Amino acid sequence: MAALVRPDDNRMIAGVCAGLARRFGVSANTMRAIFLISCLLPGPQFLIYIVLWIMLPDERKVHRAGNW
């Protein structure tokens, strides 16, 4: 499995869905569709997205720091 980071490529907003898709081996568009469908259900989906945006490291910074 790939590291859980926000990738440089395939971003739409912050790269959270692209990072999760890479981690779990699905396409980024599939992960985005899952997120959009989940937004129709009650729950804190947007808050989780914002928290992941803040908590997940940016691939550029991780790669530059040599921690990857």
Image (tube, rainbow, N blue to C red):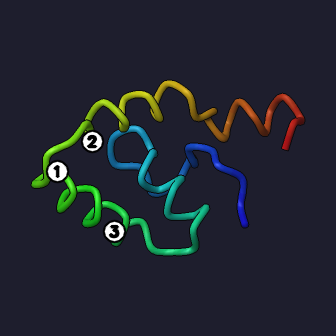
| Numbered disc in front, either 1 or 3 | 1
Label 2 and label 1: CA atoms lie apart by 6 Å
Q: Earlier in the sequence, mark 2 or mark 3?
A: 3
Q: Quadrant of the N terminus?
A: bottom right
Residue 47, given in percent of the width and then of the height, sits at 30, 30
Mark 1–mark 3 Cα distance, whole angstroms, equals 15 Å
Amino acid identity at mark 3: Asn
> Mark 1 or 3 closer to N-term?
3
At label 2, the amino acid type is: Gln
Q: How dense is the environment of label 3, judged by Cα within 10 Å: few (below 14), some, or many (20 and up)?
A: few
Q: Quadrant of residue 44 in the image?
A: top left
Q: Amino acid at mark 1?
A: Cys
Give yes or no for contact between labels 2 and 1 (Cβ–Cβ under 8 Å).
yes
**Is residue 40 placed above or below 64 in the rendered structure?**
below
Question: Is there a contact, CB below 8 Å, between mark 2 and mark 3?
Answer: no
Q: Residue furthest right?
A: 66
Q: Depth check: 6 or 47 in front?
A: 47
Which SS class for mark 1?
loop
Check disc 1: other Cα within 10 Å, few if <14, some if 14-19, many if 20+.
few
The residue depicted at 51 percent of the width and 56 percent of the height is: 20
Whole-number angstrom distance, CA of label 2 to CA of label 3: 17 Å
Badge nearest the viewer, 2 or 3: 2
The residue that mark 1 highlights is 39
SS type, badge 2: helix
Which quadrant of the figure has residue 68? top right
Q: Position of residue 25 (x, y in %)?
A: 57, 74
Q: Which residue is mark 2?
A: 45
Instruction: Quickly name the residue at label 3.
Output: 29
